[in-house]
C-alpha cells in the first residue's frame, strides 16, 4: 500500500459479506482492498496511509472499536465508516463520538454507497491537511499548538525549548499561517480542533 494514494479498505470477518461488498464496490469503479480481520488490516497498514476504511464493529479477534483505538494511537488520517447490526447502534454512535466518520446498519448497501462520497471527500481533506502539517518545521508545529491554546507571543517564547524572542515567535506564526493557508489565530484554532487526531493536539 502506498501511503500517499487514497485507498478504500474493507475489514469484515464474514467472508460472504466481505466478498459481496467487495464486488459491490468494484462495480462502482472504486479501488478497494479487503481484510478478514482487524489484525491483518493493521499489520498491512502503512504509516500515514490515506483513504477510507469500512470497518465491521463486531469481529472475532480485535473488534472494530479496538481497531479504531489503534488508528487513534497511530494518528492515522484514515476515515472510518463503521458497519453495524441493529443491536450495535449505541456502540456505533459512541464510535462516532470517538472520531469515526459515520456508521451504516448492515446490510444497507444503498446507505453505504450514499455515505461513501462524503467519506472519500473527507479522506482527501485529511490527506491535504496531513501534507500541510508535514510541511511545517518542528518549531512551527510547537508554536502552532501553543497559539491554538490562546497563548501570547511572550508566553510562547518563554515556553519553547530553547527559549526564543517574541519576534521569532511572530516570524514562526507568519510562516505556519502561510503554509496552512490560514489568516488568524481563530482559524488556526478551528483547524487544529478539526485535525486534532492527526496532529496530536488537545485544542
Image (cartoon, rainbow, N blue to C red):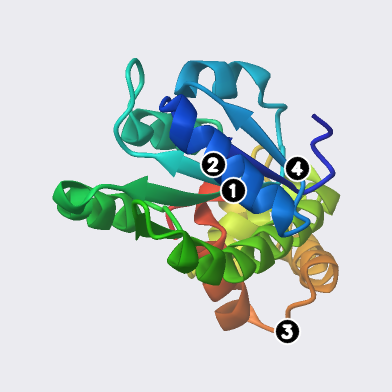
Q: Quadrant of the C terminus?
A: bottom left
Q: Earlier in the sequence, mark 3 or mark 2?
A: 2
Q: CA distance from mark 4 to mark 3?
A: 20 Å
- State the residue position of label 2: 20
Q: CA distance from mark 3 to mark 2?
A: 47 Å
182 or 67: nearer the viewer? 67
User: Which of the 4 image quarters holds residue 173?
Assistant: bottom right
Q: Nearer the viewer, mark 4 or mark 1?
A: 1
Determine which residue is flagged by label 3: 183
Earlier in the chain: of badge 1 and badge 3, it is: 3
Which residue is the site of mark 1? 198
Per the image, label 2 sits on a secondary structure element best described as: helix
Q: Residue at x 19, y 53 (%)?
A: 86
Q: Position of residue 131 (x, y in %)?
A: 81, 53
Judged left or right of residue 157, residue 105 is left
Mark 4 or 3, nearer chain start: 4
Contact, mark 4 vs mark 3 (Cβ under 8 Å): no
Name the side, left or right, on which 43 lies relative to 177: left
Q: CA distance from mark 1 to mark 3?
A: 21 Å
Amino acid at each position: 500500500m502506498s501511503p500517499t494514494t487514497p485507498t478504500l479498505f474493507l475489514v469484515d470477518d464474514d467472508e460472504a459479506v466481505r466478498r459481496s461488498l467487495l464486488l459491490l464496490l468494484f462495480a462502482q469503479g472504486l479501488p478497494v482492498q479487503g481484510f478478514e480481520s482487524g489484525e491483518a488490516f493493521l499489520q498491512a497498514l502503512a504509516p500515514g496511509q490515506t483513504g477510507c476504511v469500512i470497518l465491521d464493529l463486531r469481529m472475532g479477534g480485535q473488534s472494530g472499536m479496538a481497531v479504531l483505538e489503534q488508528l487513534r494511537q497511530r494518528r492515522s488520517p484514515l476515515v472510518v465508516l463503521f458497519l453495524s447490526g441493529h443491536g450495535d447502534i449505541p456502540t456505533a454512535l459512541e464510535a462516532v463520538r470517538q472520531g469515526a466518520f459515520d456508521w451504516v446498519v448492515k446490510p444497507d448497501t444503498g446507505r453505504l454507497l450514499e455515505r461513501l462520497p462524503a467519506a472519500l471527500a473527507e479522506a482527501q481533506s485529511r490527506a491535504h491537511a496531513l501534507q500541510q502539517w508535514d510541511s511545517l518545521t518542528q518549531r512551527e508545529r510547537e508554536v502552532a499548538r501553543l497559539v491554538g491554546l490562546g497563548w501570547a507571543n511572550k508566553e510562547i517564547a518563554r515556553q519553547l525549548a530553547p527559549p526564543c524572542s517574541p519576534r521569532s515567535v511572530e516570524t514562526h506564526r507568519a510562516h505556519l499561517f502561510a503554509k496552512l493557508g490560514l489568516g488568524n489565530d481563530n482559524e488556526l484554532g478551528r483547524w487544529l480542533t478539526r485535525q486534532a487526531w492527526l496532529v496530536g493536539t488537545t485544542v
